[in-house]
Image: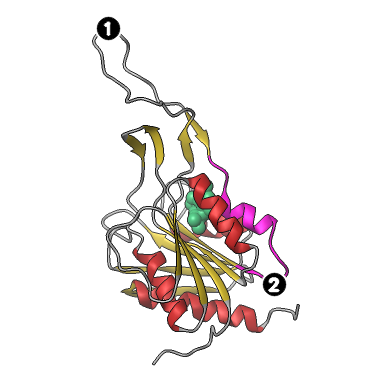
Amino acid sequence: ALPRDLDGLRVVVSAGGTREPLDPVRHLGNRSSGKQGYALARVAAQRGAHVTLVTAHTDALPEPAGADVVHVSTANQLGEAVGAAAATADVVVMAAAVADFRPAGTSGHKIKKSDDTPDPTINLVRNPDILAGLVERRERGQVIVGFAAETGDEQGSVLEHARAKLKRKGCDLLVVNAVGEGKAFEMDENTGWLLSADGAEQRIPLGTKSLLAATVWDAVTELLRRRPDP
Ligand code: C5P
């Protein structure tokens, strides 16, 4: 049996991939399956937490037993729903793949192709960074967890990118997944690093997304134990 060490805690988990509409039948999306966020919500509920799962689009997944589930589509909708739930939450985990950009405009009718007009160009504008906004408005003692999907490149390794992102976002914990070559996205297993704002770095061995979820909740309970009394 799992420990009931999250008993009574209010947690918010975001999951899935947002969709940014171009017209009534098209959108910009991403490949998030939602499996990691759902596993985080399921494990938290099993360990006794009150869970609000704010979910964008996912593969067909069973609803985590005992969680309140809020369905959203766009990044802005996800930001509103997470923000509302976060106001009374002890912990917020941003596992959703949020679109960094959305089309500058959405056409009210289906964009047509035609031989006598030029091919369309999609102009994008930035979406707000929900995670950074949560950190700005953070309640005293609230624990905020981010996710990062990174690839290594000329600018640095996966871990170097992740350390910089943890600093930039200001969250307490950052889960880093190496992506590319069939890693992380759409898979049932996950691996990576768990970085803590206090400098601790933990390798997460390849395992199920439930196992990774358990590792995250273990780290969260450890932070909460050290949290100053309200
Ligand atoms: O900067 P990047 O998109 O890699 O950061 C990923 C983390 O930030 C994830 O936790 C994701 O949920 C969150 N995010 C967000 N709002 C955005 C983009 C990402 O909260 N607009």
Q: At 23% across and 10% down in the image, what residue appears? A: 115
Report the span colored magenta: 127-143
Q: Residues within 10 Å of mark 2 (few under 14, many from 20)?
A: some
What scheme was used to colour the molecule?
Answer: secondary structure
- Image quarter where the N terminus lies is bottom left
Residue at mark 2 = 141
User: Looking at the picture, how far across and down is residue 162, in whole percent?
Assistant: 51, 58
Is the Cβ of the residue at disc 1 closer than 8 Å to that at disc 2? no
**Residue 181 on the magenta span:** no
- Which numbered circle lies on residue 227? none
- How many marks the image carries: the answer is 2
Q: At 28% across and 68% down in the image, what residue appears? A: 188
Q: In the rendered image, is residue 164 in sight?
A: no
Q: In the rendered image, is residue 190 in sight?
A: yes
Residue at mark 1 = 116
Considering only order in the chain, which callout, 2 or 1, is on the residue closer to the N terminus?
A: 1
